Amino acid sequence: MSKLVICDHPLIQHKLTFIRNKDTNTKDFRELVDEVATLMAYEITRDIPLETITVQTPVAETPSKVVSGRMLGLVPILRAGLGMVEGILKLIPAAKVGHIGLFRDHETLQPTEYYINLPTDAPNRLLVVVDPMLATGGSAIAAITALKKRDCEHIKLMCLIAAPEGVKAVQEAHPDIDIYIAALDECLNEKGYIVPGLGDAGDRMFGTN
Ligand SMILES: O=P(O)(O)OC[C@H]1O[C@H](OP(=O)(O)OP(=O)(O)O)[C@H](O)[C@@H]1O
Ligand SMILES: O=c1cc[nH]c(=O)[nH]1
Ligand SMILES: [Mg+2]
């Protein structure tokens, strides 16, 4: 079974409080999501491999570690996932970025795919699917399925807020995928929104409604 990692560093919890607040404006919402994505990037990269090289300091030659192995790819789920990309790229500037466009039908809550564009070497990369919200799990499951269909095997999922229903659904559909979240909320309401959540992430990020 995959890991569920809750990234509850005090700074992340603090920023999440302002992200949740309905009175936080679009500009601040965007900046806070960007900052939390940077902080979470620290956690999603905790287990990436290192190799030892030799470095000459001004004082002595010494063995020292550098990142090695599989390169990273970020795959935001449009639209709201876009808001997490820059924050991660600040720490991992060499990552490539693919995009998956999905929208959730307001009645059925089923995701519809409308766009996909991945780096040609995506199957060789560790892909991190990013989306602020994991509600029913339908969108994340569809995104991961779309990646697996294109021969991508090394995938993690990173979300800000998850409902228990969404975590369970992803774990059942894709038991090989580790999930990283900043908060595990209470439940979904009758409209499929996360409670207490933050409302509609895409609308809050881009000022639409
Ligand atoms: O887990 P689920 O039940 O699938 O819900 C989560 C999805 O809903 C939101 O996107 P939305 O469909 O609102 O699209 P948008 O980002 O374009 O607003 C969110 O950003 C996720 O992609
Ligand atoms: O609470 C929710 C659930 C799905 N999508 C959102 O943007 N918010
Ligand atoms: Mg939306």
Image: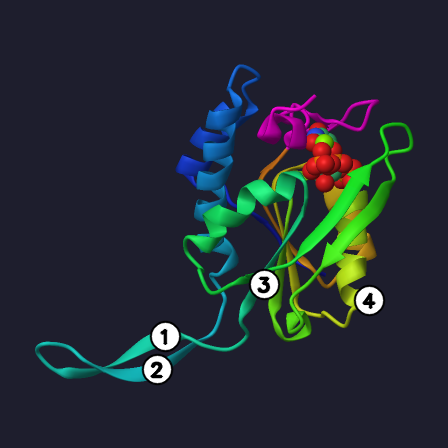
The mark nearer the N terminus, 3 or 1, is 1
Instruction: Return the residue found at the far left.
Output: 59
Residue 110 place in picture, x, y as percent:
87, 39
Q: Secondary structure at mark 2?
A: strand
- The residue to which callout 3 is attached is 73
Q: Residues within 10 Å of mark 2 (few under 14, many from 20)?
A: few
Cβ–Cβ below 8 Å for labels 3 and 1?
no
Question: Mark 2 — residue?
Answer: 52
Q: Are marks 1 and 2 in contact (CB under 8 Å)?
A: yes
Task: Kindly report which numbered mark, 4 or 1, lies closer to the viewer in this rendering.
Answer: 4
Secondary structure at numbered mark 3: strand
Residue closer to the observer: 68 or 77 = 77
How far from the left and from the top, in percent, is residue 76?
A: 64, 50
Question: Which badge, 4 or 2, comes first in the chain's sequence?
Answer: 2
Task: Look at the picture and state if 18 lies above or below 164.
Answer: above
In the rendered structure, the answer to whether residue 121 lies left or right of residue 169 reads: left
Task: Give the Cα distance between marks 2 and 3.
Answer: 23 Å
Mark 4 residue type:
Lys
- On residue 66, the disc is 1
> In 3D space, how far apart are the residues under numbered discs 4 and 1 (Cα atoms)?
32 Å
